[in-house]
Image: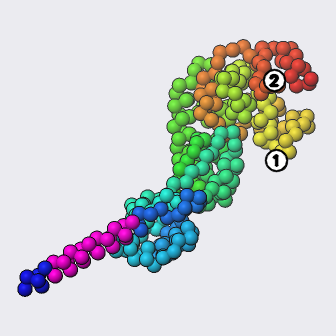
Amino acid sequence: MKRALKLLILLLSLLIIATSAVFVLVDWRLAQPLAKVDSKDGVFEIAPGDTARTIVTRINTRFSRDFATLDYRLSQVLVGVDNLPAGVYRVSHQDTWRSLWARIKNNDEALFSVTLIEGKTLEQWLKQLHGADYLRQSLKNTQALSNLLNIKQDSAEGWFYPETYHYRAHETDLSILRRAHAKMVTLIDRAWQQRNTLCEVQSPYELLILASIIEKETGVSGERRMVSSVFHNRLRKGMRLQSDPTTIYGINNFDGNLTRAHLREKTPYNTYRIDGLPPTPIAIPSEASIWAAAQPEPSEYFYFVANKKGEHVFSKTLEQHQRAVNRYQLN
């Protein structure tokens, strides 16, 4: 009897040791990196109805791993991987089955980003959004945006804040632009409230228009407020703005060569031929250009011309300006 009991205890001990060893090996398998260091990271999508077995097969194929059925069974027993939430998830060579299953079960989907920069037109933004990874296209053109976003003006040009925007897979281009619009509205309202006494524009929308012109006229941060000053001085005196970028915006299929014929043509955007501001913004302005439009530097300048260093030379009189043009543009 004692011998049988000892044998039973021995067998149970061996069984416990063997079971523990199996669990250690199983846990080791699930804790190993999915791929070699030189494997490319990426994303994969779980569609509604996809099973854990499907995901294991796909990942093992991606990283050239064997024993997909084994990985699935081990994951099923130790982690519990049924009823997976649909979505797009990141996977890297450093991931293990445990870390990947935890990410999926927590619905920790991949975040994507798109950087929309100042100085571009809304049409250019939309084209960029249409090429963004996993971003669903809901807008064919910019014409419907004013209605969709409750923009009072017919044109939505300029009404969006330039920034890097993060999104999850299958969000829409409209959702990105909705966020950008809300942020720009807040900024314009704040800048309008804090404009200085030299600001000559008559409404927040005119402030946005002028900011877009400043954005296209200079990329030098230290001279934005001085460029703004020139335009405000001209508005105050009733002088035409004579801005090349506004004129270019109004030219269909502009080929990069601004001619005298272009400057003579009367369009709503040719500020050599029209008084005051153009009817809409001509680009997406930066925050810096908006504040420059709202808070111009005090000056007596009415002219500026680009020098050969990418900066501008400012002049008080036409005679001074013509000398600067002769020096920097004609030589």
Q: Which residue is mark 1?
A: 252
Q: CA distance from mark 1 to mark 2?
A: 28 Å
Q: Position of residue 117 (x, y in %)?
A: 64, 42
Name the colouring of the figure: rainbow
Chain part drawn in magenta:
7-28
Q: Is residue 28 above or below residue 309?
A: below
Name the disc covering residue 108, or none.
Answer: none
Q: Is residue 313 above or below residue 126?
A: above
Q: Does 261 lie within the magenta span?
A: no
Q: Is residue 206 above or below residue 181?
A: above
Q: Which residue is mark 2?
A: 307
Q: Amino acid at mark 2?
A: Asn
Q: Quadrant of the C terminus?
A: top right
How many numbered circles are shown?
A: 2
Q: Position of residue 239 (x, y in %)?
A: 77, 23
Pick the front one: 2 or 63: 2
Q: Residue drawn at (53%, 25%), measured in percent from left and top?
A: 194
Q: Residue drawn at (20%, 80%), measured in percent from left and top?
A: 11
Q: Magenta region, mostly helix, strand or loop?
A: helix
Q: Is residue 58 above or below residue 198?
A: below
Tell us which disc is closer to us: 1 or 2.
Answer: 2
Classify residue 295 by image quadrant: top right
* Disc 1 residue crowd, few under 14, some 14–19, many 20+, Cα 10 Å: few
